[in-house]
Amino acid sequence: MATTADFKNGLVLRMDDQLWQIQEFQHVKPGKGPAFVRTKIKNVMSGKIVDKTFNAGVKVETATVDRRDMTYLYNDGTDFVFMDAQDFEQISISPATMGDSARFLLENMTVQVSVHEGNPLFVELPVTVELLVQQTDPGLQGDRSTGGTKPATMETGAEIQVPLFINTGDKLKVDSRDGSYLGRVNA
């Protein structure tokens, strides 16, 4: 059990026989009336995000979630296979559980897998990943109709927007949460 004072991003709550992860929270103390906590929570299984308000001090049941560092090995055609670095146990994770983060997943990448009662809930990639540009068109100097960006296909198959000066073969730093370009990596 936890109170609203214990809320933090990533905490998993058990409500209505379902697991919900806190995405955002804000403690609100209005001039009139009691304090409350406004949250944005995500259903771990369905991915649905809802806004929920809790009165301050309310006790909420938390779920025991084991976060483990695992290494991505390969895709077996349907599922993604990961290995626990400590006990070498391998688990398969479905594309639905992986979600959008699979676009930036490279073999041998270390990620954090959250497991509840033996079931993988979600996978967290490092915030920044370094990827090679597999293909991009040459940028034309003076072409500013696109705001100075062009599409580039990364080595994982993900397509992101990059500045015009990026070339095929460049290594880039990419934000794995939203796929935004962060900069070039110096070799």
Image: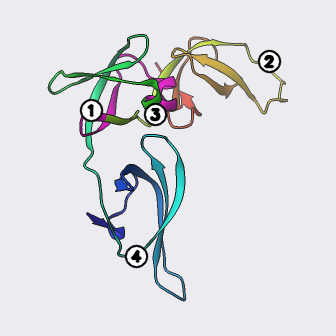
Could you tell me the amino acid type at mark 2? Leu
Question: Which label lies toward us, 3 or 1?
Answer: 1
Q: Which residues are magenta?
A: 98-119
* Residue annotated with mark 4: 56
Q: Mark 2 to mark 4: distance in Å? A: 56 Å
Question: Which label lies toward us, 1 or 2?
Answer: 1
Q: Secondary structure at mark 4?
A: loop
Q: Secondary structure at mark 3?
A: strand
Could you tell me the amino acid type at mark 1? Asp
* Residue annotated with mark 1: 69
* Comes first in the chain, label 3 or label 4: 4
* Residue annotated with mark 3: 128
View extreme (bottom): residue: 32
Q: Mark 2 to mark 3: distance in Å? A: 28 Å
Q: Mark 3 to mark 4: distance in Å? A: 35 Å
Could you tell me the amino acid type at mark 3? Thr
Q: Position of residue 60 (x, y in %)?
A: 33, 64
**Which quadrant of the rendered structure holds the N terminus?**
bottom left
In this view, the residue in front, 48 or 100, is: 48
* Comes first in the chain, label 4 or label 1: 4
In this view, the residue in front, 104 or 60, is: 60
Alpha-carbon neighbours of circle 3 within 10 Å: few (<14), some, or many (≥20)? Answer: some
Residue drawn at (16%, 27%) of the image? 86
Q: Are marks 3 and 4 in contact (CB under 8 Å)?
A: no
Instruction: Indicate the colouring scheme.
Output: rainbow
Q: Are marks 3 and 1 in contact (CB under 8 Å)?
A: no
Q: Position of residue 165 (x, y in %)?
A: 68, 22
* Residue annotated with mark 2: 140
Q: Splitting the image into 4 quarters, where does residue 179 fall?
A: top right
